[in-house]
Image (spheres, helix red, strand yellow):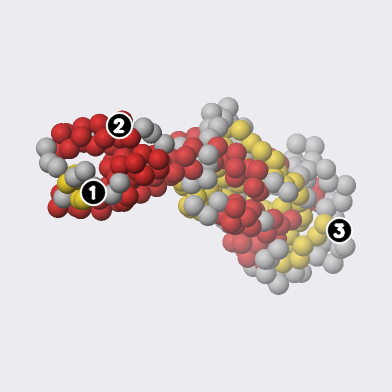
Amino acid sequence: MDVDLRQLRAFLAVADELHFGRAAERLRIAQPALSQQIRRTERDLGVDLFVRTSRSVALTAAGRVLQGRARSLLDQAARDVDEVVRVGRGEAGRLDVGFVVSALPLGPIERVQAFRQQYPLVRVELTEGYSSSLLARIVRGELDLAVLRDPDPDLAVRFLPFRRERFVAAVPHGHRLAERASIRGTELVDDPFVFFPAVAGAVATERNLAPVVVEGRRPEVVQEATTWATVLHLVGAGLGVTVAPESATLAAPDTVVLLPLQDDPARSELVWAVRADDDREILRNFIAATEH
């Protein structure tokens, strides 16, 4: 048996109207063509669907069953086609979005929410991590996009600017510079440093330490930590000092003193990262919905 959707629509029109003339008008086809289509459907199924007389048309038992099934099948087909179209237009589907925690105060999740409100049929899944690990997951296709901080360049990924911000110094209470209104980053070059491990990325490391490096001299990292919150708590405990992006210090503990850096051109850059070859409409919609 090979009954297509056009045959089901023709059958349903006659079943609803119980009149070939009105059904033909509803379908905007000639009545003889409709009668031929119904006979073909009955032949394909091997059963009579209608009892016809010169004065009336009635459904057989098989016709009554098919009437309910045909309506359900056509409704499901319409939903399926609509879903295909919405996915093609980027209005439905799924987005896997990564983010670095230090970016949260600058509003990337609010932008995700703005997209969710505009495209409620898109399921957005959020994942946090290092810039370097999130970047690797984008390249592998495990994430669709992510907001990263100072990522290393990768030809497989394109970066879209999000925010730029200053660095600030963080020292413990009682530090020799703690009472100053501001300092030069190079004044910390001989202090023990609390910092991220090298796996966080070469660009992130060099950019973050740039305010402190002077004449080739670099600070000695005596303690590593995997989040800015941990770094700042270790600074507050007196293990060393650090330099951090401004937004990463908003939740610094009371044991930490934050100091603006004088004449420091270095900036931390947050970017949205997507695969270079990923030109899906859903990503275009996300970028358009989250641009301010």
Q: Residue at x 14, y 52 (%)?
A: 61
Measured as percent of width and height from the top left, residue 241 is found at 70, 57
- Mark positioned earlier in the residue sequence (2 or 3): 2
| Pair 2/1: label in front | 1
Point out the tag, 3 or 1, that comes first from the N-terminus. Answer: 1
Relative to 209, 52 lies left or right: left
User: Is residue 280 shown above or below 77?
Assistant: above
Tag nearer the camera, 3 or 1: 1
**Label 2 vs label 3: CA separation?**
91 Å
Going by the numbered disc 2, the residue's amino acid type is Pro
Provide residue 210's location: percent of width, then percent of height.
75, 42
Residue at the far bottom in the pictured view: 254
Q: Is residue 136 visible?
A: no
In the image, residue 123 lies at what x, y percent? Answer: 48, 52
Q: Mark 2, mark 3: which one is toward the viewer?
A: 2
Relative to residue 191, is residue 179 depicted above or below? below
Residue at mark 1: 56
Q: Nearer the viewer, residue 267 or 156?
A: 156
Q: Secondary structure at mark 3?
A: loop
Q: Secondary structure at mark 2?
A: helix
Residue closer to the observer: 273 or 135:
273
The CA span between labels 2 and 1 is 16 Å
**Mark carried by residue 182:** 3
Specify the quadrant that holds the N terminus. Answer: top left
Query: Looking at the image, do the residues carrying marks 2 and 3 touch, with CB atoms under 8 Å apart?
Result: no
Q: Residue at x 15, y 34 (%)?
A: 43
Q: Are marks 2 and 1 in contact (CB under 8 Å)?
A: no
